[in-house]
Amino acid sequence: MPIDHFGIGVSDVEAAKEYYDELMPMVGYQPCFGNGYCPNDWQGAQLFLYETERDRYSRHQPGLHHIAFLVQSRNDVHRVHDWVTARGDHVLHAPRPFPQFGDHCYATYFLDPHGLKLEVVCHTPEEPANP
């Protein structure tokens, strides 16, 4: 059975929405249902934001480790990385190949403002250089 949606806890939903309202269109999602994001084609898992009592998420404790967004191209990976860098967010891994996850796996990893680890990944081969 496919996964319908994920809910992530954040200490400030409105602040998180400001961040995700910018990020999600870059990875193929649109705002929906007030506190969520749905795939542009409405096919696939949705993501919802929920207020929590804890100030900060930790990927180093049992629970969700990270969320990976699949994009079409390496250019898309770089576009998101450029946005993350321009914001001054914490980049864990700049865009690069991750061959341990497949021959064409190319990704960037970063933290959202609440400390949630996010990944933007594509599995398409590198475009040949134009001579």
Image: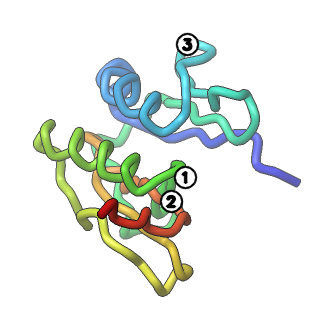
Q: Position of residue 42 (x, y in %)?
A: 73, 28
- Most distant residue in the right direction: 1
Under circle 2, the secondary element is strand
Q: Disc 3 residue type?
A: Gly
* Residue assigned mark 3: 34
Quote the CA–CA distance across marks 2 and 1: 6 Å
* Residue assigned mark 2: 122
Under circle 1, the secondary element is strand
The circle drawn on residue 70 is 1
Under circle 3, the secondary element is loop
Relative to 119, does residue 102 appear above or below in the rendering?
Answer: below
Task: Report the side of 2 relative to 35 (left or right).
Answer: right
Quarter of the picture containing the N terminus is bottom right
Relative to 31, does residue 5 appear above or below in the rendering?
Answer: below
Residue drawn at 32 percent across, 21 percent down: 18
Residues marked 2 and 1 touching at CB (< 8 Å): yes
Q: Disc 1 residue type?
A: Leu
Q: How is the image coloured?
A: rainbow
Question: Of the residues tagged 3 and 2, which is closer to the observer?
Answer: 2
In this view, the residue in front, 61 or 103, is: 103
Task: Report the side of 62 relative to 19 (left or right).
Answer: right
Q: Earlier in the sequence, mark 3 or mark 2?
A: 3
Q: Residues within 10 Å of mark 2 (few under 14, many from 20)?
A: many
Quarter of the picture containing the C terminus is bottom left
Relative to 116, does residue 42 appear above or below in the rendering?
Answer: above
Residue 10 occupies quadrant:
top left
Quote the CA–CA distance across marks 3 and 2: 28 Å
Q: Disc 2 residue type?
A: Cys
Quote the CA–CA distance across marks 3 and 1: 23 Å
In this view, the residue in front, 55 or 21, is: 21
